[in-house]
Every structure is written in C-alpha cells, then in structure tokens.
Image (cartoon, rainbow, N blue to C red):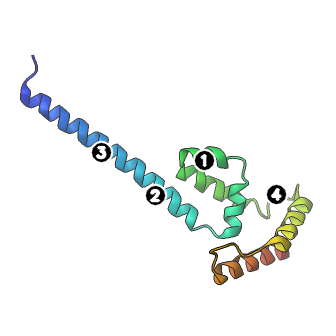
Amino acid sequence: MLHPGKTEMWRIRANNTIKRKELLEANLEAMYEVVLSLCDPVLKDQVCYHEDTEDINNKQDTLGLLQCIKKIMYSNGDDDTHMGYKHEVAITNYYKVQQKSFQSIQDYHNQFIAYRKLCGQL
C-alpha cells in the first residue's frame, strides 16, 4: 500500500513535469517565430521555397529552420550548377516586387534593394 504523502508528492511532480513540458513547447514555438521574423523578406522567400520547409513548419523546428537558413546563406556563391536559372529567377522576382498591404515603405524599399543587390551579385 502506498503512503498518502508519497502519492501526493508523485502527483505534484507529475503536474510540474507536465507544466514544464508545456512551457518548453511554448518557448520552442516562440523561438521559431522569433527566428523567422528576423529574416529579411528575400531570405523568407528562399526559406519558403526550400525543400524541407513543410516539414520544418509542421514541427515548428527551430534547429531545422536555422539549418535551412545556413544552407541558403552558404550556397549562394558556392553552387554554380544552376547559376543561369538562379539569375533568371532573381531578375523575375526583381521585376515582380510589389509593396504588400500593411508593408511599410521602408520594408518595401529594403526588399527592393535586396533584390537589386542579389541580381548584381549573380
């Protein structure tokens, strides 16, 4: 037979563990949103079209998001296999860039300048 005090202590520990797990999950989701919000519009576009994006978004996987960003950041100049295609897409995006609703003039300007720099680098 279990001691009543031990049973109560077990319940308290179980409740604390559940609360900590819920807090951890909330913090991981918040961290994912913070990392994504710090990306500039061009990088967000590249992340959205990355092959692993759907899986990363479903899991709210911050480390996966950071790995995806790292791949994008370090593959710009190293991978020349699809350079012509990348240049064509960059120019197309440059000409299609429009100010979105609720987007500030400064954000739109920054996005436009980023596309222009990208076209110049390619």
Say few, some or many: other residues with alpha carbon within 10 Å of mark 1 (under 14 / 14 to 19 / 20 or more). Answer: some
Q: Residue furthest top?
A: 1
Which amino acid type corresponds to the residue marked 3 in the rendered image?
A: Lys
Q: Residue furthest right?
A: 84
- Against 77, residue 66 (above or below) is above
Task: Quote the CA–CA distance across marks 1 and 2.
Answer: 14 Å
Say which label, 4 or 1, has the lower sequence index: 1
Q: Which residue is mark 1?
A: 56
Say which label, 3 or 2, has the lower sequence index: 3
Query: Residue 72 location, x and y as percent?
Result: 71, 59
Which amino acid type corresponds to the residue marked 4 in the rendered image?
A: Asp
Q: Quadrant of the N terminus?
A: top left
Q: Residue at x 76, y 74 (%)?
A: 98
The kind of secondary structure element at disc 4 is: loop
The kind of secondary structure element at disc 1 is: helix
Q: Residue at x 24, y 36 (%)?
A: 14
Which amino acid type corresponds to the residue marked 1 in the rendered image?
A: Ile
Task: Quote the CA–CA distance across marks 3 and 1.
Answer: 25 Å
Q: Which residue is mark 4?
A: 79
Q: Which residue is mark 3?
A: 19
The kind of secondary structure element at disc 2 is: helix
Looking at the image, residue 73 sits to the left or right of residue 81; the answer is left
Q: Which residue is mark 2?
A: 30
Say which label, 4 or 2, has the lower sequence index: 2
Query: Residue 34 location, x and y as percent?
Result: 51, 63
